[in-house]
Image: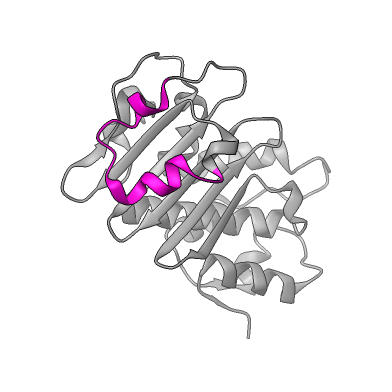
């Protein structure tokens, strides 16, 4: 049984590199399932800033989670709509200075913060003093459990409005979770067809995910 991920159980999260690979996989899968970026939950920008890569989960209804990756590690900012925001200085107590600009600047300031976690190779996952167990972390971090079935179940409900659409192949999703080079055959095991392969290539270049459509 997979552990429930939350700020109360943050040591169960993957390390920095494994989480980064997973974030890229989520963005790739969303790009395949939704040609229109505005309908995607997950996105990834490998060139967000010099030496920094950026992942975002946005449900379009107020819940939002962003992750900044640097060579020093990564930091997760989560905002669960409807929950009271804690003292940000408190929940980020002990945050490495390299993440200060991100956590106290934009876009995090505009998003809001109900929880914050960070990872460094030396100390692993950490968080500041927790004021409230109800911080939304359990509802947002679950997608980081590393189980392809978790994505399949979520995407089947979110993207599959057309009952005639093919069922997403779990083994193929697993390949993407492992970071395998994307081919047209892999893509077409996820969706019936791709109308704009060049757009998908552009998306994959932004994510910095390997592909070979030859």
Report the quarter where the C terminus lies. bottom right
Q: Is residue 175 left or right of residue 97?
A: right
Q: Is residue 129 left or right of residue 195?
A: left
Q: Position of residue 18 (x, y in %)?
A: 35, 53
Residue drawn at 53 percent across, 16 percent down: 84
Residue drawn at 71 percent across, 37 percent down: 60
Q: Is residue 127 left or right of residue 201?
A: left
Residue drawn at 68 percent across, 65 percent down: 188
Q: Is residue 39 above or below residue 60?
A: below
Q: Nearer the viewer, residue 90 or 11?
A: 90
Q: Is residue 47 above or below residue 39?
A: below
Farthest residue toward the bottom?
A: 214
Q: Nearer the viewer, residue 104 or 156?
A: 104
Q: Is residue 147 left or right of residue 201?
A: left
Q: Position of residue 128 (x, y in %)?
A: 29, 27
Residue range (magenta): 87-107
Q: Position of residue 76 (x, y in %)?
A: 42, 41
């Amino acid at each position: 049984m997979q552990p429930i991920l939350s700020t109360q159980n943050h040591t169960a999260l993957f390390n920095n590199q494994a989480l980064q690979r997973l974030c890229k996989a989520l963005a790739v899968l969303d790009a395949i399932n939704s040609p229109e970026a505005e309908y995607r939950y997950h996105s990834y920008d490998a060139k967000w800033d010099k030496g920094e890569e950026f992942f975002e989960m946005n449900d379009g209804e107020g819940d939002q989670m962003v992750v900044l990756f640097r060579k020093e590690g990564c930091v997760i900012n989560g905002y669960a709509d409807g929950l009271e925001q804690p003292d940000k200085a408190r929940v980020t107590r002990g945050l490495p200075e390299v993440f200060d600009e991100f956590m106290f600047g934009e876009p995090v300031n505009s998003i809001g913060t109900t929880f914050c976690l960070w990872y460094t190779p030396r100390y692993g996952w950490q968080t500041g003093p927790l004021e409230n167990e109800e911080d939304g972390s359990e509802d947002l971090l679950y997608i980081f459990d590393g189980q392809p079935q978790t994505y399949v179940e979520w995407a089947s409900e979110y993207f599959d409005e057309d009952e005639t659409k093919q069922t997403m192949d779990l083994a193929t999703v697993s390949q993407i979770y492992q970071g395998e080079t994307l081919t047209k055959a892999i893509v077409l095991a996820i969706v019936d067809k791709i109308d704009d392969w060049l757009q998908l290539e552009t998306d994959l270049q932004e994510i910095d995910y390997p592909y070979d459509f030859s």
